[in-house]
Amino acid sequence: MSEWVRWVNALAAFSVVSMERFLGAFLRVAAAPIRPPPEGQAAPQIGSVEAWVSESQGSPGGVTNEERGELMTEYYCNDGEFAGDDLKLVEVNIVSDKFGDEAWLYQNRVLINYSTTREAVASQKLSDFLTSVVVEDRSGNVTEVHSDMILDSNWKKKSPNELNELFSRDNRKYIYARPPRIVDRWPRRDRDYDKEQVHVLRNLVDVMKNKP
């Protein structure tokens, strides 16, 4: 066997081994459970967030809006749970907590196959909801609300003018997405492209081995 054939054979064999090792490491990382954050940096549980919200609803001496925002940001931005490109079935709920008009407005489940953050999911789904429900003129005034997309029965009974007011820019600060939660998650399947590349390289090695 000539010298250049031995070099090509060695290079092809090395490429196959390298790709298999890479794919194996990648799949192990993707399938591995998300490690909890370091000690002292764990995100508060959903119950804690609920406590902050309920405490801030009209209770004297409770959490201020600024403190509530900081706590919610701390919760939203602990992103370990949403990291990884495995498949995540995520539930999103959108509510209004305006005093006297509290309502559960929307719920949806989405399948996410990329690494993201809790805050990014909440912001995107809130934006999608408002875009689908609210119609505005060029000045930003609400002209129509699609009430059929709203879950709360009391809000469905409101007049068009009342709904327009509830979704106005001034009142939109009361409408937000609750912290999204992962209902289920599982590893993604292998890409056919990766399998094909390994197969091609193996065939190349076989051809070079059999070459006189």
Image (cartoon, rainbow, N blue to C red):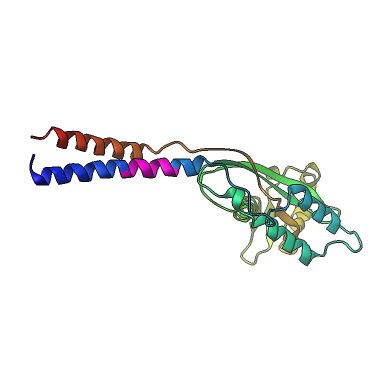
Range of residues picked out in magenta: 18-26
Q: Is residue 204 left or right of residue 114?
A: left
Quadrant of the rendering where the N terminus is positioned: top left
Q: Position of residue 43 (x, y in %)?
A: 69, 53
Looking at the picture, tell me which residue is in the foreground, 34 or 2: 2
Quadrant of the rendering where the C terminus is positioned: top left
Q: Position of residue 186 (x, y in %)?
A: 54, 37
Residue at the image position 68 percent from the left and 48 percent from the top: 146
Residue at the image position 64 percent from the left and 67 percent from the top: 139
Residue at the image position 51 percent from the left and 48 percent from the top: 114
Based on the picture, tell me whether residue 67 belongs to the magenta stretch: no
Looking at the picture, tell me which residue is in the foreground, 61 or 157: 61
The overriding secondary structure of the stretch rendered in magenta is: helix
Q: Position of residue 199 (x, y in %)?
A: 28, 35
Q: Is residue 209 left or right of residue 117?
A: left
Q: Position of residue 14 (x, y in %)?
A: 26, 44
Residue farthest right in this picture: 60
Q: Is residue 28 above or below residue 97?
A: above
